[in-house]
Image (cartoon, rainbow, N blue to C red):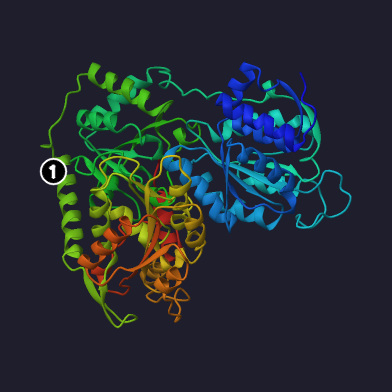
Amino acid sequence: MTGETGSGEERGRRAAAIVRAGSVQQALADGTLPARVKVTVAESVVIGLLKQNVRTFIGIFGHGSTELGEVMRVYEQAGALRVHPVRNEVEAAHAATALRWVTGQKAAVITSIGPGALQALAGSLAAASDGIGVWHIYADETTEDEGPNMQQIPGGGQGAFLKMAAAMGPAYTVHTPWALPEALRRGHNAVDDPYRARPFYLLLPINVQPQLVDMNLGALPDGALPRLGAAADGPGSYDEAARVLLEADRVVVRVGGGARDAGSEIAELLELVDGFAVTSPIAAGALPYELPRNLTVGGSKGSIGGNYAMENADVLLAIGSRGVCQSDMSRTGYPRVRRVVNINSDPDDVVHYNHTIPLLGDGRATLRRLIDALREQGAERRDLSSPWAAECLRTWQEWVDFKQRRYDRPVLFDEVWGREVLTQPAALKVVTDWAAGRDDVIKFFDAGDVQANGFQVSEDDRPGLTFTETGASYMGFAASALLASGIADDGFFGLALSGDGSFTMNPQVLIDGVQHRARGAILLFDNRRQGAISSLQLDQYGVDYATSDQVGVDYAAWAASIAGVQALHGGHSTDELRAALDAAYGYDGLSLIHLPVYFGTDPDGGLGSFGRWNVGPWVENTEKLRHQLEI
């Protein structure tokens, strides 16, 4: 049976059949949706995405997507999907990323041709860097080459935008209608990969979208990709790894983003090998903060204890880690390590270091087999009485005391503000303690010194409470992420911790957040500058340059000018900040809390840096050490 046309009436019937059945698959099985239908390519795209349970679309329509927009209008009217129009494509990319990251809910970013697609592509860097699967659907130039299309990339040559998108990740141009099933299959494999999820860029030429095709809906892909099992043993790999770990005197375990779901296995292994864990910022909460063997973050913005363990360990067990520059101290983070055991699902990451025993497979399953191998070689739970444990616990206490001194001195005089204001460490401690008592609060740390101080202060006891976009360190991510709280099927209270520099990169959420019923707050840490770069300049050259301005902004007035946004002042004390947070939490909508914070040379105003990084005047020494190391 073949549908008659791609008309709105026929579309409405197809959409209604999908809604009644509950899914495309069930509608096909029931026969209420014909297996073969004559539809436009744009409608085929929508049905194909619905078949993969993509029902949320965020973005901006334009002249390049009128047909796609009309299909979505009909399908939304039937209740098959939701479209969330926004005011900036970077914001759309961030909101879709946050939605998938926090809730698992799939989403697609939609744009027209040209500038909008370029902005969304830029925004997709966050998802690409952090391993989040998001569909990106962009209009593209026609396939007829009748002359330059308005807003296409200028110049000669075919597929200019495809080449650009393909540099970011997997991409496909639907150059002919029957290319669509393969395009959707490749996209499914990218965005739903259980280990290496990433954005997929589906380019829809504006002349192909309205073309009618006799589509076989059964040919459109669906189904879940399987997870891997434990790493293959190879020539005694588990036994060798167990032996190396048990013979070591000082084991450090790097917990990367790929190990966020393996906390119980890691905790058990740490006791068997007398090891201490150092986490990547993205893995916050994988191990409870109070676990004695959890030294939290390590790297150029790590903890004193975490960096001590990295500097002095003789064996490294890396789990789900990419070896990112700041966490890895530009490959100098483990100067005394001679052997590495690396558990990873990525074939490149698993052999990142030399002298490695690679265990390529699922993290949790592989850890279980490694634990079995350790016990077979006589490993038993170790207490904290070894010299290695004593050293790590001593440096951890140094870190606790270091932070407490800053919490005990919460306000400092700031020359710009002309009065005492809260420091970032003290304010962040208030926020993290306040959020810990509320199960529905999700924290987003924006790029900059708020982010760096934030993951150093964070004390999460489980994953999923804090999301810090350290993969791309994209300014404006946190505020944009709040949009996900209103779009999600199961809502939450989002708390974006953002600096004034990051917020002004993407302030559109003040409008879009009201439109889409976001619930949460932007806590705007205002130090009148790009504090992370100012601090770096001061550390490296003794003077900051071109990272601040003299323009005062009344952020509370800005927020109050938008109907539906609650404007609050965070005050100048910890009690006032708590009161502002309470007021935001009690508001059924979006709030902005303006908080002046300290910037200056007083060491109690921040948490400092404790590692190496291959930038600026540090390059010579960092690279010299790097080339002396064998791993």
Res. 14 image quadrant: top right
State which quarter of the image contains the C terminus.
top left
Q: How many marks?
A: 1
- Tell me residue 559's x, y (percent): 43, 68
What residue is at 39 percent from the left and 77 percent from the top? 543
Q: Judge whether residue 474 can be spotted in this image.
A: no
Is 84 situated left or right of 182 in this image?
A: left
What residue is at 41 percent from the left and 40 percent from the top? 490
**Callout 1 crowding tier (Cα within 10 Å): few <14, some 14–19, many ≥20:** few
Residue under circle 1? 390
- Tell me residue 459's x, y (percent): 25, 49
Above or below, 186 against 426 in this view is above
Is 152 situated left or right of 193 in this image?
A: right
Query: Most extreme residue toward the right, as rendered?
Result: 146
Is 350 situated left or right of 416 in this image?
A: right
- Which amino acid lies under the numbered mark 1 shown in the image of this protein? Ala
Is 605 situated left or right of 7 in this image?
A: left
- Tell me residue 195's x, y (percent): 47, 32
Res. 465 image quadrant: top left
- Tell me residue 121's x, y (percent): 61, 51
What residue is at 15 percent from the left and 57 percent from the top? 401
Query: Most extreme residue toward the left, as rendered?
Result: 385
Q: SS of the residue at dot 1?
A: helix
Q: Nearer the viewer, residue 337 or 405?
A: 405
Res. 17 image quadrant: top right
Q: Nearer the viewer, residue 229 or 120?
A: 120
Q: Judge whether residue 498 can be spotted in this image.
A: yes
Q: Nearer the viewer, residue 74 or 542?
A: 74
